[in-house]
Image: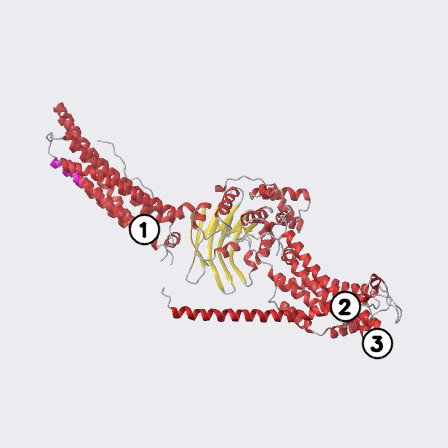
Amino acid sequence: MKHSPARIRASRAHYARRKFTNSLMLTLTGIATVLALVPLIWILIYVAREGGRFLSVDFFTQLPTPVGVPGGGIANALIGSAMVVGTACAIAIPISLIAALYVADHPDTPLGIAVRFGTDVLAGIPTIVIGMFAYALIVLPQRHFSALSGGVALAVIMAPTILRTTEEMLKLVPRTLREGALALGASNWKTAVQVLLPAALNGIVTGVMLAIARAAGETAPMIFTAFGNPFMNTDLTQPTATLPQTIFIYAISPYHDWHAKAWTTALVLIALVLGLNVLARALTWWRARRLGTV
Amino acid sequence: MPRDTFSDELTGLKNQLLQLGADAARTIGTGVDALKTRDRTLAEAIIAHDAEINRVRYDIEEQCYELIATQQPLASDLREIISILLIAIELERIADHSKNLAEIVIHMGDAPLLKPLIDIPRMADITQSMLNQALEAFARRDAAMGRAVCDRDDEIDQLYQQVFRELLTFVMEDPRTVSRALNLLFAAHNLERIGDRITNIGERVIYAATGRLEELNIERPAT
Amino acid sequence: MTSERLQTFTRALASNANINPTTQPPKMRVQNLSFYYGDFRAVADIHLDIPDRRITAIIGPSGCGKSTLLRALNRMGDLVPQARVVGRVLLDDEDIYAPHVDVVEVRRRVGMVFQRPNPFPKSIYDNVAFGPRLLGVNRRRDLDSIIEKALRAAALWDEVKDKLHESGIALSGGQQQRLCIARALAVEPEVILMDEPASALDPIATYKIEELMHTLRDEYTIVIVTHNMQQAARASDFTAFMNMNDQRAGVLVEFGATREIFTNPREKQTEDYITGRFG
């Protein structure tokens, strides 16, 4: 092969241009990444700074105090959120999992197509509308607000996310695992429950955690359903305070110390969401180490 | 086409075998010529040439092992390579018998022939023709032709019996002719053995073509 | 339902018949089997007797329907949408495609090992126990003995007996495949189907699987699909050669003793395929 000097010179120029384009693009993507992270970091820092002042053990254990009275906490909102989200999970998770199992197995049947389409639509409905739906369904007939209705509203909000994530995770399970179970004489159902679900569990848990994190922060539906409660409540049939709704009350009030408490509550909520995400990741890692799954 | 390399190697090996066969056939004729003309030089040439024939046989043998190891031949390919291997060995033994003929010529020295040679050259002609026929049957993978080769082996056996009886008569009349008779008898015996070996080749031809192992060399008791 | 299956299963466990296989009728008989994916006929009019307690290999070029035929033997082909079966497949004289046949029981009696090892992401113990647990065996003692027996039969016991609770996925490829074999053996099948079981394994692991097949031969009927002819020649007693016809459907060209097929096949198609002169 002959290398004429002209050709080498040309390729050098070409190479230099390639290098420049490469560096330019890398820089641009780096800047874009930083820009995307800025809001997150800014929010975290801002909320931490604003909300850190009132943060104390008392804040978690005491009930709200009237305006001007020092101290007070969000114990009722913490319990309330736990109840409402817990109810939502109890309703949404089983239904979504089973529906996802069906859809993953029969994606092309009329029912499967309908479920997937319906889920997509449901995922796009504004949560306030869903709150109104729960209001009409439960609050009106019962003639009072309740944690239960809040749970139902959140369940409707969580279900599409859980269903879609579970379906995707089930699809990722290698077909050979399913065949292996069926070849041993397992029925479709037992294969799904004993082999497919455990294999997809990591992804499913992540999906559920994310759905919970999202639902825990929904404010509008709570106003229509759980409504809020200045006192501690552990009765599902009674109105209940929740974290986002508490933030709302404190934030629109005209009082400075309540504004501050709003920030602190927001900090608690963010910390919870963050904690759930970290927990999801940790579970995934632990299970992978133990069982060698992906 | 897949396995072209293998096909070419197999064809080359087959051609090499056919050349070895032609060479062996020639040694039969040359050996009997040496006997007829009492040509010592010719006999020594035959003996020397046997080393070359051995070399070719071992070369073919090694190539067969190599092809078996590297190409994993199956079905007709397998039968063909095995037949090439076994036929090469038979050809080398046939050449050894011709070499024995040549050694008898040298051993006879200048002693006059006990009787004019008629049957022995005839045996040589027949065996040469049989061998050529067997080789052609192998080249063409013709089982029927291979089977037909055996038919002429009966003629060889009958000629041998004839030579035996004649020489026996000579020896009984004059016991001093025994060593000259034995020389001729051994010559005829070598040719008879060549005939048997060619029948073995015929069996290999049938195996290569059909996959069946048939015994063609049915010995009939001497009458 | 489960207790019925449990009974059949325990009967199979207890049976210790040591019958001379050559006097037995064929274990499975395929009669005029055609397999359709929708309108496409993948396999046409197969007529084949699978000898009892022998290893039968199915060979043929890619796409000739070998795997489709194999999967028809334990009704795994049913899983494909729009799959349709015409003809019969007899297991001990009972058609497995008859209308009221329990598919689950068929799949217990006719087990399958796949091309890529597919252990469940569970412990070794739970992998092998999966089948027996499906059938209702739940007592620890019973499971322990079944699992040990299966792992011994699969020539894996010595390598894993101290780490039964470690993940099945952490094993090497060859060990995983033997684990899958143990898993299949744990339900005491009568027939074991193997779909190219060693094609994903290195040569040493392949030889181990072949040795294993040989030891299993006395108790189980084995049918193996392989595209590796040397493996079919080494490991099987009988060989069936399949090829595609003009309509791209798989047909059975020749069936016979392995030593005959590989030294002197009757059909030219078989000869051409075996000597590699196809195409």
Badge 2 sits on which subunit?
A: A
> Which residues are drawn in magenta?
B29-38
Nearer the observer: mark 3 or 2; the answer is: 2
Q: Residues within 10 Å of mark 2 (few under 14, many from 20)?
A: few
Percent x, y for residue A178? 59, 56
Badge 3 sits on which subunit?
A: A
Q: Give me the disc on residue C91.
A: none
Nearer the observer: mark 2 or 1; the answer is: 2
Please, what secondary structure does the residue beneath circle 2 have?
Answer: helix
Q: Quadrant of the C terminus of chain B?
A: top left
Q: Quadrant of the N terminus of chain B?
A: bottom left
Residue A26 visible in this rendered orientation of the protein: yes
Percent x, y for residue B3? 36, 54
Residue ID for mark 3: A254
Asked whether the residues under marks 1 and 3 belong to the same chain, the reply is no
Circles 1, 3 touching at the beta carbon (< 8 Å) = no
User: Residue A76, located in which quarter of the rendered image?
Assistant: bottom right
Percent x, y for residue A17? 49, 71
Q: Residues within 10 Å of mark 3 (few under 14, many from 20)?
A: few
Residue ID for mark 1: B9
What type of secondary structure mainly makes up the magenta span? helix
